[in-house]
Image (cartoon, helix red, strand yellow):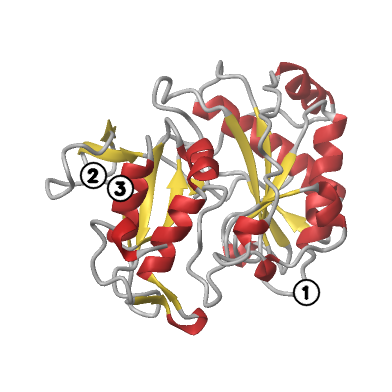
């Protein structure tokens, strides 16, 4: 991109991903080149920012509150934070203005709520984060098993890379349920899945309780909880990106290292068409008939073993 099209960008040659040779200007260019896809993933959602202003090899931090120094013309959403005991002004990415500002501020990851700002207490996304602890755990097989269970429950699932080793299996749901209700359902579905493959999968959030099994993370369904957005870069040496996949790519063992800031723009957008929104009552009843009641639990509690 010509220099005169990067108005407002300082230190364009600063290396943000030194090993990959990717600069602040490259991040700016990526955000603008991918703006249509990023806006589809980010629009109307509060965004938590992962910032590494001095590059990913230097300490970084998560930022939720924009603070007084952020430009007044950035779109915002104000929400009460129970943990901070104050109101937090979240960024809402309404257009390229916010993406340009994010690049200028060294925002290398964009994480969103599972709910939108007009109904912040009613999520529209059911997400299972498949998180392998080692290369010996097959996230590909775990994703296919997850889709199998969701298909049986009548829920159409889509999938994307986390941008690291994991996969996110996602179902769009109607915005009629509270977070506690959705999290209880997610836990019931995850327990049903893990009990079908007890040697390979677990729902236990504490690492010491996982016994070398792959975690089916059901815990993201809480107010102000977030997950990395589709098309967001990640803090990895190669500047990988969280990208939507087809199930055929999953079956073929897609390597997440193949999707980077440099290569992701050449990929088709497999989430270009919105997925249908599902109700969960029928699926919840099916799980209950199998002995898996939808009961919300704290992710910090050691209460998820057994039925």
Which quadrant is home to the N terminus?
bottom left
Residue drawn at x 56%, y 44% is 219
Q: CA distance from mark 2 to mark 3?
A: 11 Å
Choose the circle earlier in sequence order: 2 or 3.
3
How crowded is the residue under tag 3: few (<14 C-alpha within 10 Å), some, or many (20+)?
Answer: some
Choose the circle earlier in sequence order: 3 or 1.
3
Figure check: 226 above or below 16? above
Residue drawn at x 50%, y 44% is 38
Quadrant of residue 135 within the rendered picture: bottom right
Q: Please state which of residues 269 and 59 is positioned toward the viewer in this rendering.
A: 269
Look at the numbered discs 2 and 1 and tell me whether their residues touch, using CB distance below 8 Å: no
| Residue 212 image offset from top left, x and y in percent | 72, 69
| Residue 248 image offset from top left, x and y in percent | 86, 51
Q: Residue furthest left?
A: 68
Q: Dot 2: what SS? A: loop
Look at the numbered discs 3 and 1 and tell me whether their residues touch, using CB distance below 8 Å: no
How crowded is the residue under tag 2: few (<14 C-alpha within 10 Å), some, or many (20+)?
Answer: few
According to the picture, the residue beneath numbered tag 3 turns out to be: 64
Left or right relative to 234: residue 170? right
Which quadrant is home to the C terminus?
top right
Figure check: 45 above or below 68? above
How crowded is the residue under tag 1: few (<14 C-alpha within 10 Å), some, or many (20+)?
Answer: few
Left or right relative to 257: residue 18? left
According to the picture, the residue beneath numbered tag 1 turns out to be: 136
Residue drawn at x 55%, y 38% is 297
The label nearer to you, 3 versus 1, is 3
Figure check: 134 above or below 47? below
Residue drawn at x 24%, y 45% is 65
Q: Identify the disc placed on residue 84.
A: 2
Q: CA distance from mark 2 to mark 1?
A: 39 Å
């Amino acid at each position: 991109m010509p220099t005169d099209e990067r108005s407002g960008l300082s230190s364009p040659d600063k290396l943000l991903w030194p090993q990959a040779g990717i600069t602040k200007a490259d991040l700016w260019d990526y955000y603008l080149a991918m703006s249509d896809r990023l806006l589809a993933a980010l629009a109307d959602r509060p965004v938590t920012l992962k910032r590494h202003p001095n590059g990913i090899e230097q300490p970084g931090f998560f930022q939720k509150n924009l603070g007084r120094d952020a430009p007044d013309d950035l779109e915002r959403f104000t929400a009460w934070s129970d943990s901070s005991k104050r109101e937090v002004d979240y960024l809402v990415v309404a257009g390229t203005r916010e993406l340009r500002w994010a690049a200028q501020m060294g925002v290398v990851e964009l994480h969103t709520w599972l709910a939108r700002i007009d109904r912040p207490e009613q999520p529209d996304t059911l997400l299972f984060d498949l998180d392998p602890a080692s290369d010996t755990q097959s996230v590909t097989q775990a994703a296919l098993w997850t889709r199998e269970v969701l298909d049986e429950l009548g829920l159409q699932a889509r999938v994307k890379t986390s941008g690291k080793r994991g996969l996110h299996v996602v179902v769009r749901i109607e915005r009629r349920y509270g977070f506690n209700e959705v999290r209880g359902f997610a836990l019931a579905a995850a327990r049903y899945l893990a009990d079908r493959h007890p040697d390979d999968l677990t729902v236990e959030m504490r690492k010491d309780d996982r016994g070398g099994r792959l975690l089916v993370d059901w815990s993201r369904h809480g107010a102000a909880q977030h997950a990395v957005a589709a098309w967001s870069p990640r803090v990895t040496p190669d500047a990988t990106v969280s990208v939507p996949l087809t199930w055929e790519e999953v079956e073929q063992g897609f390597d997440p290292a193949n999707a980077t800031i440099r290569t992701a723009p050449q990929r088709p957008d497999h989430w270009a068409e919105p997925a249908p929104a599902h109700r969960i009552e029928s699926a919840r009843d099916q799980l209950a008939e199998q002995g898996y009641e939808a009961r919300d639990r704290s992710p910090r509690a050691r209460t998820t073993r057994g039925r």
